[in-house]
Amino acid sequence: MTTAFERIAAEARGYRGYFPNSRKVYLQGSRPDLRVPMREILTEERGPDGKPVAVRVYDTSGPYTDPDARIDLQAGLPPLRRPWILERGDVETVTGHRGRTVFRAKGDRAVTQMAYARRGIITPEMEFVALREGVDPEFVRQEVARGRAIIPANVNHPESEPMIIGRNFHTKVNANIGNSAVWSSLEEEVEKMTWAILWGADTVMDLSTGKRIYETREAILRNSPVPVGTVPIYEALEKVGGKPEDLSWEAFRETIIEQAEQGVDYMTIHAGVRLSYLPLTVDRVTGIVSRGGSIIAAWMLAHHEENFLYTHFEEICDILRRYDVAISLGDGLRPGSIADANDRAQFAELETLGELTKIAWAYDVQVMIEGPGHIPLHLLKENVDKEIELCHEAPFYTLGPLVTDIAPGYDHITSAIGAAVVGAYGTAMLCYVTPKEHLGLPNKDDVKQGLIAYKIAAHAADLAKGIARAKERDDALSRARFQFRWRDQFNLSLDPKTAEAYHDETLPAEGAKVA
Amino acid sequence: MTTAFERIAAEARGYRGYFPNSRKVYLQGSRPDLRVPMREILTEERGPDGKPVAVRVYDTSGPYTDPDARIDLQAGLPPLRRPWILERGDVETVTGHRGRTVFRAKGDRAVTQMAYARRGIITPEMEFVALREGVDPEFVRQEVARGRAIIPANVNHPESEPMIIGRNFHTKVNANIGNSAVWSSLEEEVEKMTWAILWGADTVMDLSTGKRIYETREAILRNSPVPVGTVPIYEALEKVGGKPEDLSWEAFRETIIEQAEQGVDYMTIHAGVRLSYLPLTVDRVTGIVSRGGSIIAAWMLAHHEENFLYTHFEEICDILRRYDVAISLGDGLRPGSIADANDRAQFAELETLGELTKIAWAYDVQVMIEGPGHIPLHLLKENVDKEIELCHEAPFYTLGPLVTDIAPGYDHITSAIGAAVVGAYGTAMLCYVTPKEHLGLPNKDDVKQGLIAYKIAAHAADLAKGIARAKERDDALSRARFQFRWRDQFNLSLDPKTAEAYHDETLPAEGAKVA
């Protein structure tokens, strides 16, 4: 009998078929085990040397699209980075929660990419990233040391292929997945992850809130070649029976240690929602819409105490540095509507996030800053500029933003508009929004639609930022278009099969493609 | 037996069903026959007076969504503007081409909205527009007199409900329709028009190139409550057997007179493609991609002569002023790829369009300026700024623009990004792009997808421009969202039925909607 995992693995092996005339290639680094995956698209165009022109594009899909890789979802992906982690000699093996054997820093060392970068070390992770981005490894080191970019790379997630989030690199896209109490299974979430990376997700966030949170996250982590993020307060809340007032620093602390041991690469932490900011949200049209922000607000109101994530922030940093978990400082007071954009509540929290950034950096912990949400076009620049200024150039990671509230059902579009614009202004990573936003939970096709819209936004931002490799693809596709090389036009596009199907619908003859 | 027209009319009558809890209302103007249609969305929210809050939105759908209107596609819509045109006493009835009785200016008068505005007259059309936009009629007059806005309103298209295109008004959206040699019928194009205006098309362009061009245009014009634009060079080319070199001023002249007599409200005229600019396109990645531009280029190269549209431009103006046909100055050298954006060819033509704008204005002819096409995000502002400067603030009317070339199949999204941004910078009308762009001809669903993406872009631009009425709808929807008034959230959205269906897919219980 075929198990669900076997079925998903078999499907993932077929995903290569979505990209005809493409093949997996690897850029060889300075050591045999440093091989950077790219997707090479072969075209009918001939270069000056008479050979076919091939266009290489950034590839997030991992071993699933490598015909030579063995895929076994039960066993997980090979631990690519394990030798690099061990060679540094700064981690030890300890018995963690649930009896699992995990890596942790020896003593109270920081085993973070930022710590190495600041010491002048170019790690294999940095070299990997440099080849992947087409830049100098020393530049990568400098940006990470400066805090202007992060490489989320938990020592307990050695399966991940290193990637970098920072405004001087390709704009990245995150896809949210995760089951809920009313919907979907562990296996479906693994399937969504493999599907999401096929369509270009640079990271995935597992936002599971239902049963088997730990097991779902385990299955995703062991099979994910991209960094995995979480919002630990969701699991902490489940642990205390779903009552925000029963949350405690101790419950939260246990949760982040357990997740760090599992290999979570970055965690959203809503440490900037301060008690004194809550009155600023009272006159809003849409109050507090961040789930994490609402949970923390409820806890503070029940206890009349300052946010425990804020008061314990140094301890959080002291834990996460031992695993290299990056912090994604959550924007718990982000606006949930055009009416609330760029208001005092939002910017008050942003100031606090800037203060926390400096603390995290003092612990060598990598940091990025989460941003909204809903912002009209004319307020986008102020939003990005303020983040860069108040948060000392730590990478910005926004949800959209949506530039209007009036199009539920099409919020992948309303938000891709905002995402492209903030990307061009310097936002480093864009959290996708699917057509189901505000309405329901995304299915597999929604995940794809969200990702395509966001790859468009990220690529448009890269063109605007002058990323050299980005324009190569546009130019190759435009030449194909002008020369009526239909197959090349399809194959160079973000979604070849859809382009081909739309073409065939009105001009079905094969002859029309080679005209 | 039911005819195609009867079937389409019956369907159009059902279109109201797409907008539950909406009803047609009319704003009464200063005279009984001046009634401006709006769509009023009733909500469950109560105002301070205890009455249900109703949100009124701009309505392009015409009599089709008025349950009291009689719809007969064979007879056409009632000639709403006829009394206004006749009262001015400046047109006479003449026998035009094909023996049809048409209106034309007496003598060589200009019967254009610009001519009246310059003489200080507020026409019923201007008052209609003022009520529709929520501004002062005198402001409308000033903007039209100044050439910063146009009201396309051919005296032979009295069925149209006046609308205005200018950057100080709501951002408008155009939908291209039209049959081709290989596809679709006259009836299908009328159906597409009624469908397009349901989803918010402010104007439609009939780009038919196949058989029965005249009849198709006639059916569209007589049934269209929105202005209709054309590209007359397409029909002129058909008249000379499809050979660009056989085109002549005389053939073109006959075509524009015939179309003006039929009631075409604006015509794209590629008068700025000058012979001396052609060498500027030689090193482009995608040469000349405008169909009109290519036709004119082929003619010039065959004859080694200057573009006859340029040399005869004053005569064109002298004809069009007699019917109030607005000129849409075509951008025949628009870039067809990111690589060619904002190049010398494009801006050389734009300078000429500025020169032609002044000539048209000297004839009291209303003018707008067409723009690209394909432009990366960082070059959008320069493009809009140059248009405003070089073309003396004549309204800008762009095709998208697409901000990347790599997403055929999703170009409604790539271009909605550019459209929203240029709209916020002051582009007055956005020509939609459907998912089939570059691939094939749009079907009915593609038309809808293109329009929704563009209504999002236009609305986002309106929010950025500070159009007061725009934000009312966002705020009403956001309040509904925050208060879990699901029905109101659906009904206030651009596409209620889709929003509802997406919601029901994962949370099907009726109870979930009123939670």
Image: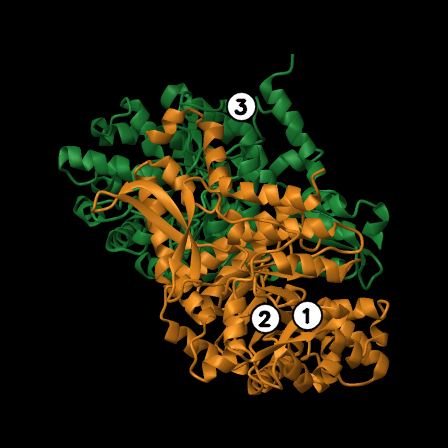
Chain colours: A orange, B green
Density class for disc 2 (Cα within 10 Å; few <14, some 14-19, many ≥20) is many
Q: Quadrant of the N terminus of chain B?
A: top right
Of badges 3 and 1, the one in the foreground is 1
Question: What residue is at 64 percent from the left and 15 percent from the top?
Answer: B2
On residue A154, the disc is 2
Look at label 3 and name its amino acid: Glu
In x, y percent, where is residue A400? Answer: 58, 61
In x, y percent, where is residue B103? Answer: 43, 31
Residue B264 in view here: yes
Of residue B9 and residue A465, the one placed in the foreground of this image is: A465
Look at label 2 and name its amino acid: Asn
Density class for disc 1 (Cα within 10 Å; few <14, some 14-19, many ≥20) is some
Which element type, helix, strand or loop, lies under badge 3?
helix
Q: Which of the 4 image quarters holds residue B262?
A: top left
- Mark 3 touches mark 1? (CB < 8 Å): no
In x, y percent, where is residue B365? Answer: 36, 46
Chain letter for mark 3: B
Badge 1 is on which residue? Answer: A101
Where is A260 relative to B378, above or below? below
In x, y percent, where is residue B165? Answer: 47, 50
